[in-house]
Amino acid sequence: MAQTITVIPGDGIGPEVTNATLAVLKAAGADLEYEEHLAGVTALKRLNDPLPEETLESIRRNKIALKGPLTTPSGTGFRSINVTIRKEFDLYANVRPVQTILPGGRYEDIDLVLIRENTEGLYVGVEHYIGLEGDPKAAAESVMIITRFGVERICRYAFDYARANGRKKVTVAHKANILKYTQGLFRDVGAEIAKEYPDIEFEDRIIDATAMMLVLDPYRFDVLVMENMFGDILSDLMAGLVGGLGFAPAANIGTDAAMFEAVHGSAPDIAGKGIANPTSLLLSGCLMLDHLGQTDVAERIRAAHAAVIAKGEARTGDMGGSCTTREFTEALVAALD
Ligand code: NAI
Ligand code: MG
């Protein structure tokens, strides 16, 4: 029986890249049924709720979601729906592979995977203002939560992933020199877990130096694992190594459910213009197919995608081309064999 998935088109360029992704999934013969639901600003406008219960119900039922980017108001307004969904379904492992597809970039043959802890750290959103002398916002504080349980499961996930995918090395990146308790716990537990995997090389590195080394010599890394916010920041940096956010897919994996989404946001600067690069969500769709055991379909899509880009005739603006999202998608469908 075909797997039913919850599809959330999202905000901004979300519907554009979601339509493109669904067109390719369908043309490639993915064995899926689609159930569309709203979230984010679009849901707030239409249903007066940024995360309607029917959307949550659908994910609860299907346990698999493909989600376009959702706009999060900055500074004020509702809490990130992305973060809320990850928390709600305990999608603790955010897997973000970056691979060179577009030739002629800063580097060739990049093949890295960042595994970001997705439920703890500063993103638990425990923060508040402190008023002083009539100024209600004289200060603000935020709490970083790191638990042994959380670090153990994300580090085990990283090492298991390395083993299952024939990877050689896991780097735990942290800031234990300054944040001795929270980040110290992350580093120490990471080192403990590493001992269970003698076949995988292990190193721990300070996060800022890791960022510098990723830019200077990305080839020294393989799988990287880190807490939530560091992973958020470094995954954008790593996307930059392979041509930008348009190329970075992500899988949010929990024990019971999984959500697949682009690393990029709703790109309000290009929304509605029909020029977004759908690669990131499409490759997230491929991660979903891998997860569902439809690896053959995922491989066909990846091969068609790589072939279209290598040929160079159909590329979107961020790849230096002038294709619309629709033209690029048509080229992808035509390239499926
Ligand atoms: P963004 O990722 O939306 O855009 C950053 C830059 O990359 C922009 O110049 C944009 O045009 C470009 N870009 C992004 N995706 C692209 C694509 N597929 N094709 C071509 N160019 C692309 O980040 P920004 O502007 O900081 O955030 C916009 C909104 O998205 C915010 O409300 C933010 O909270 C939200 N966001 C949501 C995420 C999610 O749903 N998981 C992740 C990141 C941001
Ligand atoms: Mg981000």
Image (spheres, rainbow, N blue to C red):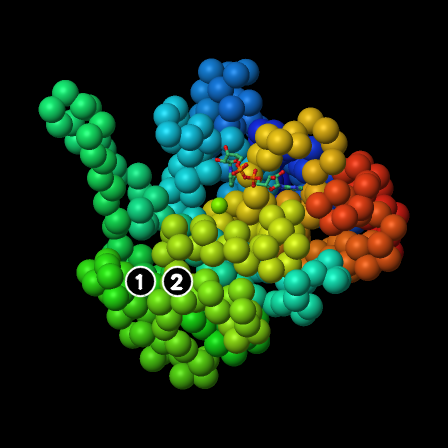
- For label 1, the SS is loop
Residue 107, position as x, y percentages in the image = 66, 66
Which residue is at a point 39% across and 47% down the rendered structure image? 90
Q: Name the residue that disc number 2 marks.
A: 208
- Is residue 172 in view from this perspective? no
Which residue is at a point 18% across and 23% down the rendered structure image? 135
Q: Name the residue that disc number 1 marks.
A: 175
Of residues 260 and 127, the one nearer the viewer is 127
Q: Are marks 1 and 2 in contact (CB under 8 Å)?
A: yes
Above or below for 271 versus 319:
above
Q: Quadrant of the rendered structure where residue 173 is? A: bottom left
Label disc, if present, on residue 24 of the rendered structure: none
Counting residues from the start of the chain, the first of labels 1 and 2 encountered is 1
Assess disc 1: are there few (<14), some (14-19) or many (≥20) residues with their C-alpha within 10 Å of its C-alpha.
Answer: many
Q: Left or right: where does residue 238 sit relative to residue 334? A: left
Mark 1: amino acid: Lys
- Is residue 112 in view from this perspective? yes
Q: Left or right: where does residue 100 sit relative to residue 233? A: right
The span from disc 1 to disc 2 (Cα, nearest Å) is 8 Å
